[in-house]
Amino acid sequence: MSVQFHLKLSVIVQLACKSGREMQASELCELMPDSRTVQLAIKYASRLHLMQLAERLGNIAQMKADEEQTIEIEDDFT
């Protein structure tokens, strides 16, 4: 995925947060490529005092981090 795609996805997440569409923001974060990108969305949600969303995004970030670690371990064995 290109950097431009990541930036556009981040902007859409920000717009979803601002307009109160927390479920759409969390669904968009599931499309993000890695946990670091989701961490940025968590910071943004926290700035807007959307703590439930930030917690939900934290779960998504943890799942992505686990996936990244699994892939890294698999790469080590191949």
Image (cartoon, rainbow, N blue to C red):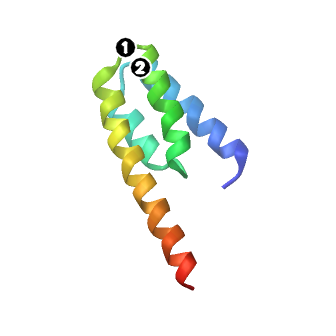
9 horizontally vs 69: left or right = right
59 horizontally vs 17: left or right = left
Residue neighbourhood size for the residue with mark 1, other residues' Cα within 10 Å, grouped as few (<14), some (14–19), many (≥20) = few
For the C terminus, give its image quadrant. bottom right
Residue neighbourhood size for the residue with mark 2, other residues' Cα within 10 Å, grouped as few (<14), some (14–19), many (≥20) = some
Residue 75 image position (x, y, % from top left): 56, 76
Identify the secondary structure beneath mark 2: helix
Amino acid type assigned to the residue bearing label 2 in the image: Ser
Q: Which residue is mark 2?
A: 46
For the N terminus, give its image quadrant. bottom right
Identify the secondary structure beneath mark 1: loop
The image quadrant of residue 42 is top left
Residue 15 image position (x, y, % from top left): 50, 23
Q: Determine whether label 1 and label 2 are within 8 Å by CB.
A: yes
Amino acid type assigned to the residue bearing label 1 in the image: His
Q: Is residue 31 above or below residue 28?
A: below
Q: Which mark is residue 49?
A: 1
Q: Which residue is pictured at 53% across the width and 50% down the height?
A: 34
> For the residues marked 1 and 2, what is the alpha-carbon distance in whole angstroms?
5 Å
The image quadrant of residue 56 is top left
